[in-house]
Each structure stands twice: as C-alpha cells, then as structure tokens.
Image: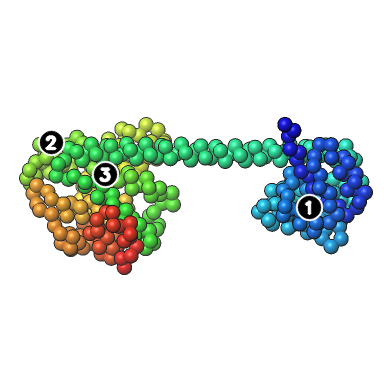
Amino acid sequence: MEQTRKLIMLVDDSRTNLLTGKSALADTYSVLAMPSAAKMLEMLERHTPEMILLDVDMPEMNGYEAIRVIKSRPETKDIPVIFLTAMSSASNELEGLELGAIDYITKPFSPVLLKKRVEVHLLVAAQKKALRDYNENLQSMVEEKTRTVVKLQNKIMKAVSDLVEGRDDSTGGHIERTQHYLKILLESLLEAGLYSDQIDNDWDIDLLLSSSLLHDVGKIVISDSILKKPGKLTADEFDQIKQHVDFGVRFIENLEEDEDDRGFLKYAKIFAGYHHERWDGSGYPNNLRGMEIPLMGRLMAIADVYDALTSVRPYKPAFDHQDAVEIILAGRGTHFDPVLVDLFEKIHPLFALPIEENEVAEGKVS
C-alpha cells in the first residue's frame, strides 16, 4: 500500500513562486498552494501540514504577522515554518527566527535547493517527534515502575507492622489507627499553614503516612513476657519497653543498604526514634525538648497517646473520647507541642469518628 504523502503548505502572493515551488515538491509531497496568509489560516482549520513554506512580504497580512498567529494556537504551534523572502539582511532573518521560524530560503529559490531544505527539516522534525515520543514513553515507564516500587514498599511496611502488632494482643489495630490520626493532624496542619518553615518542600505525604506504620517496629525484639504481660509493668520492665525506640531505629538502619533505601525509610526512622520524646524534655530516649524534637515525632506523639488512652490495656480500661481530649489538652507545653495541642483542640471531633466516616467529615470541623 502506498504510504500517505506528507502535506506541505506553500504560501506566497506570487503566482510564479507558487508554481515553481509546487513543481519542485509535487513528486514527493502533497502540496497545498495558496496566495495569502488569510487563506492559509482558513485551511489550517481543516488540515494539519507537516511544514509551512511562508512568504514574508505579502499584502494585508505579512509572514511575521501570520507566524505569530500560527505559534499562538496550540493546535498549530508545533508546525515547522520556513520563511520565503527576497530580503537578505541579518536583522530580518533574526526577527523571523525569534518568532519561531526554523529557516529562511531566499527568493528566487532553486527548486532543487528548496526540495533539499524541506527534506532535511522534515527529517529533523521527525527525529524531534520521535525523541518526544520516546521521552513520553520513558516517562510513562518510569512512572509505572515507580508505582510498582511504591506499592511494594507499602506492602513491606504493612507486613512488618502486622508482624509487630501480632505479637502484642493488647494493641490490636493500634498501628493503623495512629496512622489515621496522624493523617488528620497532618492535613489540618498543612491547611492551617502551621510550621511551614519546618515542613520540607520535598515531603512525600503518602510515603510519610505509610512510614508511620513502622513507628513501633522496635517492639519486635521485646520479650513476650513483657510485651504480653497482663498487668502493669515494673520499673525495670518499663525500662526494657523503652528500648524499643533504639531497637526500631537500628532495625531500620540495618535495612538501609543504599541511597534508594535511605529515601524510602527516612521518615520511618524519624517516627521510630522520636515519638516518645516530650516537649518538656522528660521523654525518651534522648530527653529532647521543644523544637529539638522533629515535627513528625511531635505529631506522632499526639496520635500515639490518643490511641493508647482510648484503647483497652491490661492495666487500664479505655478512656472515652472526651476524657482523652482533656488529658491531651492538659499535656500542652509539657508532654506535647503547644501549637499542635491548640490544633488538636479544634479538630479533635474528627478523631472520634469511625475511620470510614472521616473521608466525608475531614475539613468540616471548625
């Protein structure tokens, strides 16, 4: 089957130039010859050529005016334009190139030269299009690969968090609930514009939330006799429980084999290492205070404590929502960041809703 010929538009107010140009190109290309820019613009509404050969010096609308229109329209801006001109000054050529022309051909033109210039520029245009298509396909492949990697990362974090939680019968659902509370706090923080100086521009919110699943990963090495003890811990046992923070950080560091892993796990290490620090410096493991505690750790502290308060433990019943709120408010400036407590005070009704209802309710609490 014969391959469809490429369409060339030839625009010139000289009948002689139209005949000469069409004769030079007609054996290889389909040529639409027209005597004015207005006619060309009309034809562009019905046809998209591979190239436009455009006379500069025409009545009513000259070539410079016409190319401005061509380049201003999304549907025609990428069509290569070669100017045909009897003008030969450098300033004239520069003006045309700045307007988007790819070349000049001086009139009267040689038919052989005209055909060769068209051939070369069409080849360049085809190569550019092929490169654009390749880059778009490559970008699509990269995005698909990234989605696959992220999905795998999330599965790994979920599997590890399930393994940790499965060892502690008293805290079922704790990890996913704290992730949910953290999401509420983080979205409200961003909406309120708080701590914008501490929120990195490159924070990956989805990865951050997924990483929060590993905040208690260090409990994987805590003895069952302590982790599952049906009663209040002794001081010595509590000291051993506190080691889960350092164990968690080390566990994550052992997973960091290369730069990609460090990017993937950077948030997880912060959550694991800082969620038990307290604003007044009485927390563990490093007795950090105030702004020394990373923002992610300060956010997780509220989510973690709220869930601990409202859940049954061997040593206590579950507090109701309002009692838990009062305890957190009372910890303003001691256990918790005052700014975050003030934010929590405004949005705490969202914490009381079942997880599936929050998608509807988020953003509606004043």
Q: Is mark 1 on a helix, strand or loop?
A: helix
Question: Which residue is located at x 70 percent, y 38 percent?
Answer: 126
Residue 96, labelled with which disc? 1
> What is the spatial separation of the Cα atoms under label 1 and label 3, in whole angstroms?
62 Å
Local SS, label 3: loop
Q: Is mark 2 on a helix, strand or loop?
A: helix
Please tell me the numbered disc located at residue 215. Answer: 3
Upstream in sequence: badge 2 or badge 1: 1
Contact, CB < 8 Å: mark 1 with mark 3?
Answer: no
Mark 1 neighbour class, 10 Å CA radius: few under 14, some 14 to 19, many 20 or more: many
Residue 195 locus on image (x, y percent): 36, 59
Which residue type does callout 1 highlight?
A: Gly
Please state if 323 lies on the left or on the right of 137 as rendered.
Answer: left
> Residue 319 or 24: which is nearer the viewer?
24
Residue annotated with mark 2: 224
**Alpha carbons under labels 2 and 1: distance apart:** 79 Å
Identify which amino acid the numbered label 3 is placed on.
His
Q: Position of residue 338 (x, y in %)?
A: 26, 62
Alpha carbon distance from label 3 to label 2: 19 Å
Of residue 8 and residue 295, the one placed in the foreground of this image is 8
Q: What residue type is labelled 2?
A: Asp
Q: How crowded is mark 2: few (under 14 residues within 10 Å), some or many (20 or more)?
A: few
Give coordinates of residue 150: x percent, y percent.
Answer: 39, 40
